[in-house]
Amino acid sequence: MALRSRTALTNIVNQENVKNIKSSINGVAGKTKRAALGEIGNKVNTIRGVESIDRPSLLLKDKKKVVAQKQAIKPPEKVAEKPPIQIVKPVIKFTVPHGNHEVPTIPKKEVESFSSDLLAVEDIDEEDKGNPSLVSIYSNDIYEYLRTLESKFPIAEGYLGGQEVTPKMRSVLIDWLVEVHQQFHLMQETLYLTVAIIDRFLQTFHSIDRKRLQLVGVTAMFIASKYEEMYSPDINDFVYITDNAYSKVEILQMEMLIVKTLDYSFGRPLPLHFLRRYSKAGKALPIHHTMAKYFLEQSLVYYEMCHYPPSLIAAAAIYLAFVIIGNDNEDEQKFVWTNTLAHYSTYTKDDVLPVVREAARIIVNADKSKYQAVRKKYVQAKYMKISTRPELRSPTLIAIATANKKTV
């Protein structure tokens, strides 16, 4: 028994340590193959598990057999080296002049789309590929999904027709909510989501009277705060902001009604989401981006703008900001909506211009409007005092606002 134990122990040690293989062992190695470890380890391991590993067999083994075994492993590596050479060849054909006979073998449309995508459209996510938090590889898919959501939850034009709530009452409510939003120091997304909840609810639930309209607005902001904010205001704060016009129970009851009416769906994209993407595609400066946000918040107040898709309103806002800041020359205005912006927004210049004119009319008349909450908000220094800038009273903006079907 002692002799058997000693022989087994010596066999195990010699299998694990190849350097000590000089000792003579008559035992047979295990027949279990470990391909991964065999490739990484010593060359002796390539025949492990095939024959007995002992000193006489290794010395008497025919060298040709060993070479044949090693060569049987190498051919797959040589085959793997050939495909990269075959893949490069079709790419070279794109650079061959049209007079060459090989060009007709490639469809003409593919050649045109290949060149136009590389030369005219810039990859705005190229610099972000090394940042995993920006998930640049999924950016285009994410915004494509957001466009499907905005078409899934549309706001119908003239949805208040036949209701007791009028467009003027809606504008008064939104103007007041802008002030409430500032007092609570809420996030920007909360304000946009609040207005989206109000519009979606009012176009579905038609029995809201003017006495409960403010209750709808306060409850919508209460829901949006819980959806967007990390620390949402307490319900008692919303009771206080209404000067106790509504109780805590009434707000909770309205919350349940709104949530059930909207089928618990609050994922409709916001104009702010698209604006950030367009500002990146257009290489906007902070002044352009802030002015575009001013245009968006002004559009929230007015009923005639609520039926436009969020992506289209954002495109119109950044277009108008580019036009009136640093583009007084008419020749430069022709290049405002670049191919890159058209590609990432999916809108052409003709698609954007009607909304641009609507927004321009609102901005031109902002001084005379009864709804001053947004304008007062953007007087502050942290918003670059956008609402007081002279560009908002420039001839360029007035020309856009008064234009009918002329090209801007």
Image (cartoon, grey):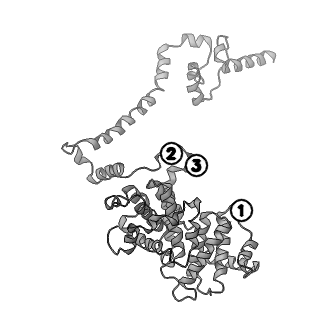
Q: Is residue 188 visible?
A: yes
Q: Which residue sits at x=56%, y=23%?
A: 46
Could you give the CA–CA distance between mark 1 and mark 3, rounded to whole angstroms?
23 Å
Q: Which residue sits at x=55%, y=81%?
A: 203
| Percent of width and height locating residue 362 | 47, 74
| Percent of width and height locating residue 397 | 41, 68
Q: Nearer the viewer, residue 188 or 133?
A: 188
Residue at mark 1: 231
Residue at mark 3: 133
* First reached walking from the N terminus: tag 1 or tag 3: 3
Dot 2 falls on a residue whose secondary structure is: loop
| Label 2: how many Cα within 10 Å (few below 14, some 14–19, many 20+) | few
Residue at mark 2: 129
Quarter location, residue 37:
top right
| Label 3: how many Cα within 10 Å (few below 14, some 14–19, many 20+) | few
Q: Is residue 140 visible?
A: no
User: What amino acid type is highlighted by mark number 3?
Assistant: Ser
| Percent of width and height locating residue 359 | 45, 71
Dot 3 falls on a residue whose secondary structure is: helix
Quarter location, residue 258:
bottom right
Q: Nearer the viewer, residue 406 or 118?
A: 406
Judged by depth in the image, the label closer to the viewer, 1 or 2, is: 1
In this picture, residue 389 sits left or right of residue 347: right
* First reached walking from the N terminus: tag 1 or tag 2: 2
* Above or below, 198 relative to 189: below
User: What amino acid type is highlighted by mark number 1?
Assistant: Tyr
The circle drawn on residue 61 is none
Dot 1 falls on a residue whose secondary structure is: loop
Q: Which residue sits at x=59%, y=75%?
A: 175
Q: Nearer the viewer, residue 11 or 81?
A: 81
| Label 1: how many Cα within 10 Å (few below 14, some 14–19, many 20+) | few
Q: Quadrant of the C terminus?
A: bottom left
